[in-house]
Amino acid sequence: MQNRMAAAAAAAAAKKLLHQRRSIPNFSQINRLSSTSGFTHHCAPGHLKQFLASYRWDLWKSCLIHMQNMSAIHHRKFGSVASTIVQRNPTFSTINDDDLIYFEKILGVKKVIQDHEELKTANTDWMHKYKGSSKLMLQPENTAELSQILEYCNSRRLAVVPQGGNTGLVGGSVPVFDEIIINTRRMNSIISFDKVSGVLVCEAGCILENLISFLDKEGFIMPLDLGAKGSCQIGGNISTNAGGLRLVRYGSLHGTVLGLEVVLANGSVIDMLGTLRKDNTGYDLKHLFIGSEGSLGIVTKVSILTPPKLSSVNIAFLACQDYISCQKLLFQAKRRLGEILSAFEFLDAQAMNLVLRHLDSVRNPLPSSIYNFYILIETTGSNESNDKEKLEAFLLHAMESGLVSDGTLAQDFSQGSSFWHIREGIPEALMKAGAVYKYDLSLPVEKMYDLVEDMRIRLGGAANVVGYGHLGDGNLHLNVSAPQYDDAILAQIEPFVYEWTSRHHGSISAEHGLGLMKAEKIYYSKSSETVQLMASIKKLLDPIGILNPYKVIPSSLVS
């Protein structure tokens, strides 16, 4: 085994020297530079070993650092982009043969993954922007195995990154350097389901779509629905506090998650797996772990309240000429549809054009024209005739008042699914269109589209600015699409997008989390006192800092 690791290390080192380029994530710098669109060159002699240990990223497919000769380091800093140089924590250990022997002893050889191809996939996020260099992935089957792993890693100062379906967009679920990947896919059992209370208890590695299918057979639904449901895992959903398509009806996971089981960095198992809707005995600690992105502990089990599946579902696809009409339509939908409103999504003409151009299976439900905005409304209730009558009356009023320019009501399940496919297919269409810069923001509804328009003015014809999202809960997905990643474009986007959001009292992360991408940007949404308190909690629960390092909280506060 020793020879095998030595040979692998030698091959990896040779590959680094011959082929790899290194780059700094140019969107997270602590030292703010002047707001210009230019850049400055910096060259420093030597220090090759430190360089190779510190800079491992090619986050935006652009050569921010490129090793062209071994005697100097070349990189660029953009004036309008804040960038953090991420350095590997020198107190962390690296894996050795004894570590492999221990992990194989407690897990078995099959669950200790060293295969290059499997690791290549696990080291890379689904958008291929974030790439780590982990040499080891562990796949525990139960809480006891995960507890042993973390207890050992904590004692050895081996950093780890929890990973579920790896569908995140901010670099939270892949290594930054050589952290051990702990993948929960084998922890995928449904433990219990109570039809009377609607409480589902399951393990963290259950794929969301599998839970949706299970509950559908039982006459219930998950309160959470995402475009990535075929791959994402419920543990990851909880760790990022994923919002999804129906938050306007069922609320966030802070409201629907009743209990958690979590393993801390030292291997301690914290059993908070309650199934009660009311439990007022002291601090409700589960909320610390919802949205903490695996930085405080790894979720292993969850109990969640699931609503009954209602028989009446209606879906309308509408067109509006301006964003003010979209806002007024939302106001009217809340007043006139009330308790049956389950989704209110919007997309602009640019988003629609991308979907029609890049997804073969999509057809325009309103082919007579391309409108400026589109709205998808879903209602869910228990009385089909009354629900449909209420929706049709709402649509008639919207048409007569000029809020809606055109629209159609799904006549069957297939047509309704085709409407949803347009909305859920936007991320795929953006990927097929080329490079994409993605921003997940919460803003006051009346201000949401102002940012899209301001970004278009700022970028001119350099990129295609696309706006869509969950209008019902004020969540904008701002996407900047370009043929390829371009430093000059990114320099115009950041930090402008964060400053704009902060100035309008928004949040720089609505539902995707902070991960690596936004860890240093947290001050745009949180006060320094709040961030300091978060860092204190991190140090209390994970004093060595092995859990998902370099993410969520600025490294300077927890190193």
Image (cartoon, grey):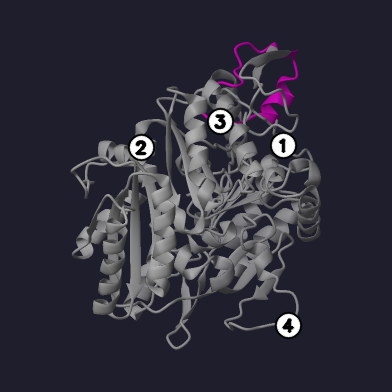
- Tell me the element at label 3: helix
Mark 1 packing: few (<14 Cα in 10 Å), some, or many (20+)?
some
Q: Name the residue under label 4.
A: 281
Residue denoted by label 2 = 350
For residue 509, above or below residue 330: above
Quadrant (top left/top right/bottom left/bottom right) for the C terminus: top right
- Which residue is under mark 3? 493
The amino acid type found where label 3 is placed reads: Ile
Q: Is mark 2 on a helix, strand or loop?
A: helix
Dividing the picture into quarters, in which one does residue 153 lie?
bottom right
- Spatial CA distance of label 4 from label 3 is 46 Å
Whether residue 186 is visible: no
Mark 4 or 3, closer to the camera: 3
Nearer the viewer's eye, disc 2 or disc 1? 2
Dominant secondary structure, magenta: loop
Q: Does the magenta stretch include residue 491?
A: no
First in sequence: mark 4 or mark 2? 4
Seen in the picture, residue 16 relative to 297 is either above or below; the reply is above
Q: What span is in magenta? A: 44-71
Q: Label 1 to label 3, Cα distance in Å? A: 27 Å
Which residue position holds label 1? 88
Q: Tell me if 348 is positioned left or right of 242 in this view.
A: left
As drawn, 153 above or below 551: below
